[in-house]
Image (cartoon, helix red, strand yellow):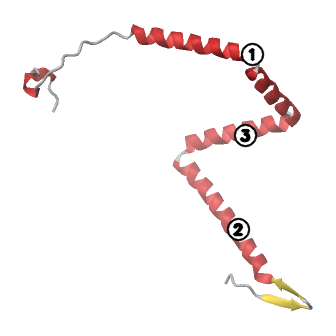
Amino acid sequence: MYGFRSVDKGEHRVGTTWTQHGIQHHAIGQHFDIENLVNLVVQCPEHTETVIIAMTGCAIVLAVVPVKLIIMGVVVSVFASTSKLGKEVKRRKRDMGNRRLKGWWDSIPVIPIEVVDKVEEIPKAMKRD
């Protein structure tokens, strides 16, 4: 079915089935793509709807905002984050986050632990089977 059959046209040989093979292959690929999308919608509709909304939002943003402004924003943000001021701001934010994490960690009460040599020494109320 997918063999190569050529037709003589003077000195050139034209393959007729390669074109048909490409068309059939493309149609099969589209069928499987659509089938996979349908399966996704059926199996997990909440996640699929979330992805559809996110992709639609991205498409609208890309359609409305010129690419030049997006590139300019990326360049400015990279420049700002690599400058001395940007590095200082990052360091202060990181230190403040670490301070909060340390404060939270220190607020957790310490539970006393008793080390036992044998299982028989554990009270029955605390044993787990």
Image spot of residue 73 (x, y percent): 81, 27
Residue 27's disc number: 2
Crowding near pointer 1: few (<14 within 10 Å), some, many (20+)? few
Name the quadrant of the N terminus. Answer: bottom right
Residue 8's disc number: none
Disc 1 from disc 3: Cα separation: 37 Å
Disc 3 from disc 2: Cα separation: 25 Å
Residue 84's disc number: 1
Please state which of the two labelled residues, at mark 2 or mark 1, is closer to the viewer.
1
Q: Disc 2 marks which amino acid?
A: Ala
| Residue situated in front as seen by the camera: 4 or 64 | 4
Q: Which residue is located at x 71 percent, y 73 percent?
A: 24
Q: Is mark 2 on a helix, strand or loop?
A: helix
The reply to whether discs 3 and 2 touch (Cβ–Cβ < 8 Å) is: no
Q: Which residue is located at x 67 percent, y 38 percent?
A: 53
Q: In this view, does 114 lie to the left or right of 13?
A: left
Image spot of residue 20 (x, y percent): 76, 77
User: What residue occupies the far right of the structure in this picture?
Assistant: 10
Image spot of residue 64 (x, y percent): 84, 35
User: What residue occupies the far left of the structure in this picture?
Assistant: 120
Q: Which residue is located at x 72 percent, y 76 percent?
A: 21
Disc 2 from disc 1: Cα separation: 55 Å
Q: What element carries label 3?
A: helix
Q: Is 21 drawn above or below residue 92 in the view shown?
A: below
Q: Disc 3 marks which amino acid?
A: Thr
| Residue situated in front as seen by the camera: 112 or 26 | 112
Mark 3 = which residue? 56
Corner quadrant of residue 81 = top right
Name the quadrant of the C terminus. Answer: top left
Corner quadrant of residue 111 = top left
Q: Is residue 14 left or right of residue 113?
A: right
